[in-house]
Amino acid sequence: MTTTLKDVINLNGVKKKYRRFLWCCLTASLMGMGVLVYDTARDSIPDELMIFPDEQPDWETILDNPAVTYDPAVEVSQNGSYRMQCSLFGMIPLKTIKVTSVEPQMVFASGSPVGIYMETEGVLVIDSGEIRGMDGIMQSPAEHIVQPGDYIRKVDGEILESKKQLMKLVEKNQGEPMEMEVMRKDELIDLALTPLQTEDGSYKLGIWVRDNIQGIGTLTYVDQKGTFAALGHGISDVDTGERLDISQGDLYDARILSVKKGTSGNPGELRGVIDYQENLKMGKIVKNTPNGILGQMRPEKEGKLSRQPYEISLKQDLKTGPAYILCDVGEGVQKYEIEITKIDQNAKDSNKSFVIHVTDTKLLELTGGIVQGMSGSPIIQEEKLVGAVTHVFVNDPTKGYGIFVENMMEH
């Protein structure tokens, strides 16, 4: 079998195409690796950083990446803050860090269990459904009109404060269309619902609503002005999963009666009782933020709390290694040893900025690790308040997440 010139030319053409294909694959791979290196380096840099006056940050440690360089020439503003440009290999701009000077602050870390009662801003719609009308037919008068997560603020011009008030207005309306002002995802909208008369003669809208929420958590700290912070994360509705808009709330004394021990795949919980008495109110809740609930403590109640003075620590000062938490699992507020195993200064979810591992044998015996109700437990390292417990790993209750205390103080 002889090879012709045409065959040789075709073979060379195939080889050239194959080489071009390989070069394209190599170029695409290098570009992909470059993008990955760039994104990884950028994401490792914090957006903002707080420093104490006259403090010289250790940028090499903070940036923690030899490929990332920073420009030491910075412009200082009147309030002591400045912006610093970070680059990849000194050539490719990555991110500008906002650096703010803050005064050192002393707060009182607690760890005491507290009862939480909050009222929603308006009435929260949980869901809509079918109801049986006078004719015996199932109907959905609210379907495609309201949505889970809507807050009904006004009905026929009247400010709505409770579901009991809504029920009275519906019954009074006698089946006429009701004009409603609703807050939906930070936008006020107007809509109308017409109550349906049911088989028993009463009127209903076909919606499930909620106007308050309550539970037990842990108080993180009280500052020297009486402002308190707890939980380390916002309170969300159990049905909609959305963080609650609140009109007001109260902080109460609480007692832990028992503990449901946590196991893999089955989170435990602190079980207790809340004393809903006026004289046992500890303070007023004013905000339900993504980083915890905030409020003002009653001055006469501050002395009744477990509290110890600690200087706050900034996030760049947190280290992997030993620390301890303050919490009450039925035996009063005590110290329990933990290990900080991983830190992310620029976590997308501020409630999950670092990982902790419970090492205290007594706490492991009592609770199995971190359980529901321990959210907000202060985390102390080198005798400074560094943050609070926020979440437990569902498949490993000995591990959980924490939030930097500076994030809790932002609001």
Image (tube, rainbow, N blue to C red):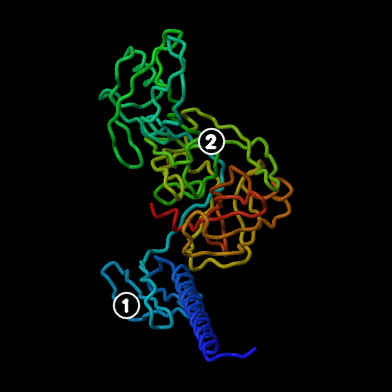
Q: Is residue 108 left or right of residue 93?
A: right
Residue drawn at x 41%, y 67% is 49
Residue 185 point in image, percent of width and height: 36, 41
- Residue 90: quadrant of the picture: bottom left
Q: Within 10 angstroms of label 2, few (less than 14), some, or many (20 or more) residues?
A: some
Residue 229 point in image, percent of width and height: 46, 48
Q: Is residue 103 above or below residue 284?
A: below
Q: Secondary structure at mark 2?
A: strand
Residue 372 numbered tag: none
Quarter of the figure that contains the N terminus: bottom right
For disc 2, the marked residue is 215
Residue 74 numbered tag: 1
Q: Is residue 296 left or right of residue 329?
A: left
Of residue 192 and residue 101, the one placed in the foreground of this image is: 192
Q: Secondary structure at mark 1?
A: loop
The disc labelled 1 sits on which kind of residue? Val
The disc labelled 2 sits on which kind of residue? Gly
Residue 255 point in image, percent of width and height: 60, 36
Q: CA distance from mark 1 to mark 2?
A: 47 Å
Q: Is residue 401 above or below residue 267?
A: below
Q: Is residue 156 left or right of residue 142?
A: left
